[in-house]
Amino acid sequence: MTLLRDPSILIVGAGPVGLCAGIALLKDGHRVALVDSGAHGAGWASGGMLAPLYEMAADPACPDLYVQFALNSAEHWQGLARTCGVDLHAPSLFLARTQEEAEALLGLQQRANGLGLDVATIPVPAGLTAQAAFQAPSERSLDPRAALKSLMNQFRELGGDLLIGQAEAIGPHRLGLLDGRILEAETIILANGFGASSFGQSVPTLKALRPVKGQMVRVAHPELECPIMRAGRIYMLSRGGGLVIGATSDPHTAPVTSVDVDPVLALLAEAKALLPSLAMKSVVEAWAGLRPDTPDHLPLVGASGVAGIYLATGTYRNGWLLAPAIGAYLCQLISGKTLDQALMNLFAPERFSS
């Protein structure tokens, strides 16, 4: 049996949420260990979008409290990026391909202005087949693969412990690994995305998690003047001397990360219709990930209902965006500090208890 020094916090999952939570807790004086399975998760497979306007404020049904939480998290990224050496890219270009999309973006512009954020109408750049264009300076992105390394370096520099192993079983204050090790800790945080659903028998609230498969491609194409372009469901990111195009969204396929041909071809066709210069360009790489979703598309953050176990998952499309704010939130919760009750109710895992 491996006993962590008491008091101790054990975080399962080395993605953006787990790492940001670990960094926040270490800065608050806690002793933290991170369990990393070594497998690529949804954070590695994502586009690294930090886009509260496009992802949340664009949806009139999205709760204002959640939009504000996301906006606050986007602001947290400014300081975190400087501390950890993470490059943030901006601005974003929102494109409307139809009159319906143009009207939706006008509505988004109004909501953004009401939140004190600038979304300006600009001419459609040459080479794009769009009807209208809007520029959003505050909508950013990062390179997930580089950012994970930078966050891990920061976690270890702050004194965090890294344990390599696959979590297999969980109980009050106890985690069992596939290799037979048993870890005990005062607090265990499950931040391993959809992987946390494997503990659904021990932590019933995790049965609310469902996988949404997302697939992306990297294409050999000259980088664009604007580093981030979005239109409807797709985005194109100038990154690494090419274009990253994402992302499909399918909640009905098997929870596996193999790449499916038809959805990727449909994604490429949609991107080429927007950017005709993509024709005959080479696909360099294709990959897939499983987003951790919930029935109301809101995360599970807080006490699980099992002694000593907290949840930090269910972030759906916004793991990177929400990671710093979730880390700060968990830090306050675990330290017994006062939190906004409405926000606690919004994120409470118990809302899905049967």
Image: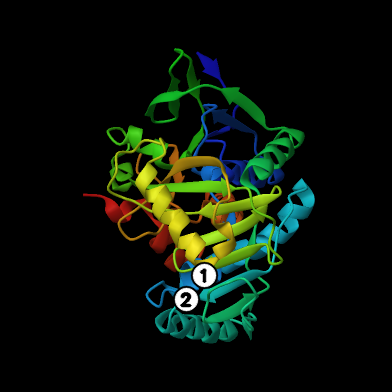
**Res 238 → quadrant:** bottom right
Residue 40's place in the image compared with 49, above or below, is above
**Amino acid type for the residue under numbered disc 1:** Tyr
Nearer to the camera, 337 or 10: 10
Examine the rendering and report whether any part of residue 82 can be seen.
Answer: yes
Instruction: In the rendered structure, find residue 97 and report the number of the disc placed on it.
Output: 2
Nearer the viewer's eye, disc 2 or disc 1? Answer: 2
Residue 321's place in the image compared with 31, above or below, is below
Examine the rendering and report whether any part of residue 29 can be seen.
Answer: no
**Amino acid type for the residue under numbered disc 2:** Arg
Q: Which residue is mark 1?
A: 54
Measured as percent of width and height from the top left, residue 286 is found at 51, 41
The outermost residue toward the front is 280
Instruction: In the rendered structure, find residue 74 and report the number of the disc placed on it.
Output: none
How packed mark 1 is, by other alpha carbons closer than 10 Å (few <14, some 14-19, many 20 or more), is many
Measured as percent of width and height from the top left, residue 265 is found at 41, 50
Horizontal relation, residue 126 to residue 186: left or right: right
Measured as percent of width and height from the top left, residue 214 is found at 43, 48
Q: Are marks 2 and 1 in contact (CB under 8 Å)?
A: no
Model colouring: rainbow
Name the residue: 65% across, 81% down: 118
Residue 297's place in the image compared with 190, above or below, is below
**CA–CA distance in space, label 2 to label 1:** 15 Å
The outermost residue toward the left is 354
Q: Earlier in the sequence, mark 2 or mark 1?
A: 1
Label 1 sits on a secondary structure element that is helix
Nearer to the camera, 284 or 141: 284
How packed mark 2 is, by other alpha carbons closer than 10 Å (few <14, some 14-19, many 20 or more), is some
